Image: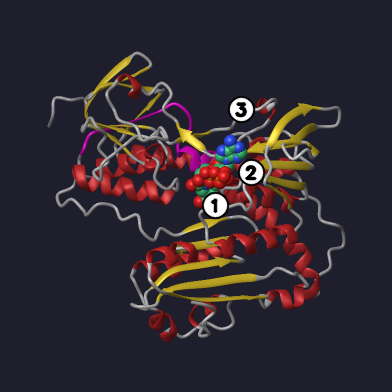
Amino acid sequence: MSDFDYDLFVIGAGSGGVRAARTAAATGARVAVAEDRYLGGTCVNVGCVPKKLYSYAAHFHDAFEDARGFGWSLTEPPRFDWATLRDNKVREIKRLNEIYGRLLDNAGVELIHGRARVVDAHRVEVDGRAFSAAKILVAVGGWPWLPDFPGSELAVTSNEVFDLERMPQRFLVLGGGYIAVEFASIFNGLGSESHLVYRGELFLRGFDREVREFTREQMALKGVNLHFETNIQSIEKGEGGLLVTLTNGESLEVDAVLAATGRKPNLEGVGLDALDIALNPDGTVKVNDRFETTIPSILALGDVTGGPELTPVALAEAMHLVGQHFGEAPPKPMDYRNIATAVFCHPNIGTVGLSEEQARKEYDAIRVYRTDFRPMKHTLSGSEERCLMKLIVDDVSDVVVGAHMVGEEAGELIQGIAIAVKAGLTKADFDATVGIHPTAAEEFVTMRTLSRR
Ligand code: NDP
């Protein structure tokens, strides 16, 4: 046993920090976690979990419409009550916070409330209390960032949007990333007039071009107002709401503006600036493949290190970190290829591997198989919603290097396909798989006609 108070001192009880703390404690390490806010971090409190709950709420809008074609009639027009959703969400998150507390407790991890500051390679201070540790893990995550423009203080971020006092009847989101498309869809589904303002020519930069175009069409069809190649110039408080002036001269009156313009590392007060710890050009903490910073006893993982800002990535990093620093047989470095992801816009996007554009750069020759169709459910529902599925294949090896979907439950479906892509299976393997009928998913094993090379 070392002379330090702890073998591992974790700063931040988010997804990555909690997983690292529990897993390290299970190896017999003496572990503490410091947290100044809420247990579970962004994902549980103001991210994935409440977002998915609100997305479910928004989907009922379509479900009520779709039901008619199947013989259902609603005797009264459905009404939505924001306060019920918000307050039920608050209760559910409180339950999850308590579960996180119990998980740490049962694992024998000491929870210290307060903002921790790293003093040196082995010392941490929390509100005047000093602690020493063999290793310190910085897992403080990120924090929403928004550009500075006149009236930017009138915009909310994803930290506040779930808890708005009243449902905005007219809603505007700035940005073209995950949060922007998800919230434009959520408020549209809940019944708001919904606007998305994005500075580029098409949102979701970095995703497969065809997926982006298809999503644009589907979201517009559902009623989201898309404003591309423009930005917010200013927001002013007007009599009836917020007056938003765009750089293209257009102006819109809305009840709430959400800035979804990315996140920055949440390093304020953590003390790294006073130490000689190298940062990446974007301000995230630089680590090697053992998650060591330039001071090797100070480790970092998750959003603060600037990898894909996704909970499952932080969880996987935590498992690798503990294997490397507290395990008997250190695992191989974390493999960041083929990480599947879903965007919960409506309809959902699910994707794994390379986009068509990336595959054209990486491989000499590729084959693209794609289909878009009206899902069986919508033959009776009357909905115009369509589904896109797409496979990208390396022509030489026949390996499927990318799979993409826009459609209902795309995340659920692509998770399964991700195993095949991660395993390096070929198009012939997909073709040899017998489909499940009638599903949309069966298209992934029945696409035989080459769409293009
Ligand atoms: P993203 O980084 O995904 O997107 C930020 C958006 O803001 C981009 O479209 C960017 O434009 C735009 N932007 C940046 N600066 C400005 C500016 N000065 N003026 C106008 N627009 C600007 O961030 P999000 O906030 O959407 O989400 C943060 C992260 O959280 C995501 O990257 C994702 O990793 C994670 N997340 C994951 C989810 C999931 O797994 N389903 C859901 C929600 C979040 P441009 O493209 O031109 O740079």
Q: Secondary structure at mark 3?
A: loop
Q: Please name the residue shown 66% across and 38% down the image.
A: 258
Q: Secondary structure at mark 1?
A: loop
- Quadrant location, the N terminus: top left
Ligand 1 within 8 Å of disc 2? The answer is yes
Ligand 1 within 8 Å of disc 1? The answer is yes
Instruction: Please provide percent x and percent y for residue 93.
Output: 54, 41
Evaluate if marks 1 and 2 touch, with contact meaning CB atoms under 8 Å apart.
no
Please state which of residues 341 and 362 is positioned toward the viewer in this rendering. Answer: 362
Evaluate if marks 3 and 1 touch, with contact meaning CB atoms under 8 Å apart.
no
- Residue where numbered disc 1 is placed: 205
Please tell me the numbered disc located at residue 199: 2
Mark 3–mark 1 distance (CA, rounded to whole Å): 22 Å
Residue 172's place in the image compared with 383, above or below, is above
- For residue 158, say whether it is visible: no
Residue 377 is drawn in which quadrant? Answer: bottom right
Upstream in sequence: badge 3 or badge 2: 3
Segment colored magenta: 29-46
Disc 3 crowd, CA 10 A, few/some/many (<14, 14-19, 20+): few
Please tell me the numbered disc located at residue 148: 3
Instruction: Please provide percent x and percent y for residue 52.
Output: 58, 51
- For residue 408, say whether it is visible: yes
Q: Amino acid at mark 3?
A: Asp
